[in-house]
Amino acid sequence: MNNPLLVALLEAEHAAVYAYGVLGGRLDEDPRRGARAAFDNHRARRDQLAALLRAGGAAAPVALPSYDVTVATPQQAYGLAVRLEEGLALRWRDLVVGTDDAMLRALAVAGLQETAVRAAQWRLLAGRSPVTVALPGTT
Amino acid sequence: MLAGFGGAVIAGLTGCTSEPAVPPPPDPDDLLRAAAVARERSLLESYDAALLASPALTARLLPLREQHAEHLAALVGPAPSGSPSDSASGPPSAAPPSRSPPTSVVLPAAPAATLRTLVTAELAAAAGHGADAVRATDRPLAGLLASLSASEQSHPVTLA
């Protein structure tokens, strides 16, 4: 186990779950469904990471009571969603290069893929170009 | 795949006519890198064929093709200084010659079918890179393959 990396990921997933709950409320029905799917996915990853830490005998940090999330418009919601996914992509990639454990490596690759796809979906909705990046998880 | 192995065997035979010494086994990470290079070159061929078949898709496809050129450059390292560096204007010059003969890419002319073909190719490459990212011993190589995999997994967002 690489606990500092898993802890950093878990903390970021906690923040993402909170933020998607807020930003989804600023979106119309179609994109809100996307936010709901992202919320569910981040919650599942959050629970998976917490379980991994506990299974290794480590403490799993809980969510903060609240996070500084200010979203007033759909554009701000898209922007926040892109930043969330890009931030998580960095941490998933950190885990890819921070472990030799095949299970953790596979988890990290899947996490990096998911964040790259969602970041692209939000960039597309926000009207940004380019929609995709060549090297997700590398700033 | 079979053609690739055949080519390697032939290259091995012609390379050791006088000495029976067994060549050292290749570094597994080198094989993973070579497989990734082959996947990116194949994708570039697919995009070139798609651009020819469906010029109407050019604005959509060129940014993705450019990212595959970046992928290939990241895999093979920086081009030697003084050599042509515009990778979008032709076959990437920094790439080593492929051992396997180039696969002929045949794409349907209808844009919708072209896009579907590219989506399939992107997702196949993403799966290959992703699996090899797990197998790689060298951690930076693992990170690179994971990023390539994630990029290709996201490309269908603009192809679908």
Image (spheres, coloured by chain):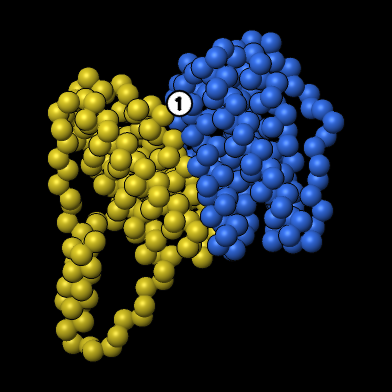
Chain colours: A blue, B yellow
Q: Which of B131 and A86 is in front in this view?
A: B131
Q: Is residue B54 left or right of residue B44?
A: left
The answer to whether B79 is drawn above or below residue A28 in the figure is below
Q: Is residue A94 left or right of residue A106?
A: right
Res B19 → quadrant: bottom left
Q: Is residue B12 left or right of residue A118?
A: left
Tell me what residue is drawn at x 34 percent, y 53 percent. B37
Disc 1: CA contacts within 10 A as few (<14), some (14-19) or many (>=20):
many
- Number of numbered discs on residues: 1
Q: Where is residue B137 in the image (x, y as percent from the top left)?
A: 51, 65
Q: Mark 1 points at which residue?
A: A131
Q: Which amino acid does label 1 sit on?
A: Val
Q: Where is residue A78 in the image (x, y as percent from the top left)?
A: 58, 19
The answer to whether B18 is drawn above or below residue A23 in the figure is below
Identify the secondary structure beneath mark 1: loop
Tell me what residue is drawn at x 66 percent, y 38 percent. A43
Q: Position of residue A107 (x, y in %)?
A: 57, 52
Identity of the residue furthest to the bottom in this view: B20
Res B47 → quadrant: top left
Tell me what residue is drawn at x 44 percent, y 35 percent. B154
Q: In this view, does A62 lie to the left or right of B125?
A: right
Q: Position of residue A125 (x, y in %)?
A: 49, 18
Tell me what residue is drawn at x 82 percent, y 53 percent. A59
The answer to whether residue A85 of the structure is visible from this angle is yes
Q: Nearer the viewer, residue A52 or B104?
A: A52
The answer to whether residue B72 of the structure is visible from this angle is no
Q: Which chain carries label 1?
A: A
Res A58 → quadrant: bottom right
